[in-house]
Amino acid sequence: MTLTGHAQPGSPPPAAADRGIGIWVGFSALVTLLVGALFVIIVMPEAPSSAIPSRGAPAAPGSSQTPTASPTPSPTPTPRVEPADSPLQKLGLSATQCPDFTVRRSAVPRDELEGYLNEVLDCLTLTHRQAFADAGLTLSRPSLHPETAMNQSRCITDNTSDDWAGLYCGADEAIYFRPDWAPDDPVFLVDVMAHEYAHHLQELTGILAPVSEDQLAAKDEPNGEIRSQELSRRVELQAECVAGVLTRPAGPLGVRQTDFDSLVWARASVPPEWAATHGSGRAQRRWFQTGADSKGPEHYRQCNTFTVPADQVE
């Protein structure tokens, strides 16, 4: 499984100091930043249960023949698609602003938080609907749950820290969030959802499963941990790039330029405990900006972190 996180920022830049203090205080309290407070859990599909064979034709009257079971055909394995060749990179996305969503300008009350996050997910699902249909893919909307529902999740993690804001579970196609981790600036909440939704897109376009397979295989290889961490960084930095597409001022969420600049700046520093699996602050910032600068309609083509050299996903 792969876990994601964000680094703790320093003092906000002058342009954001008057309105972003709530974000930075929230990050400081939890040790991790914006893009690093997000987790993705990748799980391998469970092995299919043993099939119960169906009974064959009954024996002829008077025959002592024992009925035999009809053979159960083996399921045809799904051909593996390499992450670098995922259809995500080929989606023709018309990333225009959602007509029914506006980023709030003030803190979101706790009792309105889940509704606000669902509005973000509705916007992002609407944004991708036509692109998935044109590509012949099925688009589902991820469900949203508070962290208290994680004990019913099919994803299991032994991570017990509280330094995360959102978590994506591929097996559930669900995003989990922490209601008590809501900074004053709702732009941060939008960014959290954009990052987690990017993991959902990776799940739907066949990226997470082969990465998980490769990480499991790497456990038995020399320097396997190094290889596994590199794969995790490629997943996370691709999600950063996708989030850049979705949160840029001209994107579907309609984030203002000053707010977007603060999101870029906040990725400048990532604590060492997150960098190994999520990328350095420099890498997060570069890939986030790459997504923001992408040209359409195939915005995500420029987010293919699986084709670049290792020093681009440091």
Image (cartoon, rainbow, N blue to C red):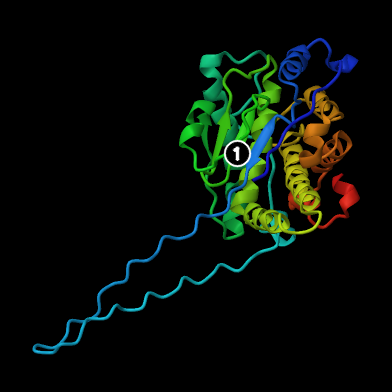
Few, some or many residues within 10 Å of mark 1 (<14, 14–19, 20+): many
Tally the numbered discs.
1
User: In this view of the protein, can residue 253 be seen by the observer?
Assistant: no
Q: In this view, does 65 lie above or below 142?
A: below
Asked if residue 249 lies left or right of residue 144, the reply is: right
Q: What residue type is labelled 1?
A: Tyr
Q: Which residue is drawn at 46% across and 70% down?
A: 75
Q: In this view, does 13 lie above or below 161?
A: above
Q: Which residue is drawn at 60% across and 16% down?
A: 108
Where residue 229 sits: x, y (%)? 77, 47
In this view, the residue farthest toward the top is 18
Where residue 232 sits: x, y (%)? 74, 46
Q: Is residue 62 above or below residue 243?
A: below
Q: In which quarter of the image is the C terminus?
A: top right
In this view, the residue farthest toward the left is 62
Asked if residue 241 lies left or right of residue 60, the reply is: right
Residue highlighted by disc 1: 168
Q: Which quadrant would residue 279 be assigned to in this image?
A: top right
The foreground one among 248 and 174 is 174
Where residue 137 sits: x, y (%)? 57, 57
The foreground one among 153 and 9 is 153
User: In this view of the protein, can residue 205 be seen by the observer?
Assistant: yes
Q: Residue at x 79, y 42 (%)?
A: 291
| Secondary structure at numbered mark 1 | strand
Where residue 306 sits: x, y (%)? 78, 55
Asked if residue 145 lies left or right of residue 236, the reply is: left
The foreground one among 211 and 53 is 53
Q: Which quadrant would residue 193 be assigned to in this image?
A: top right
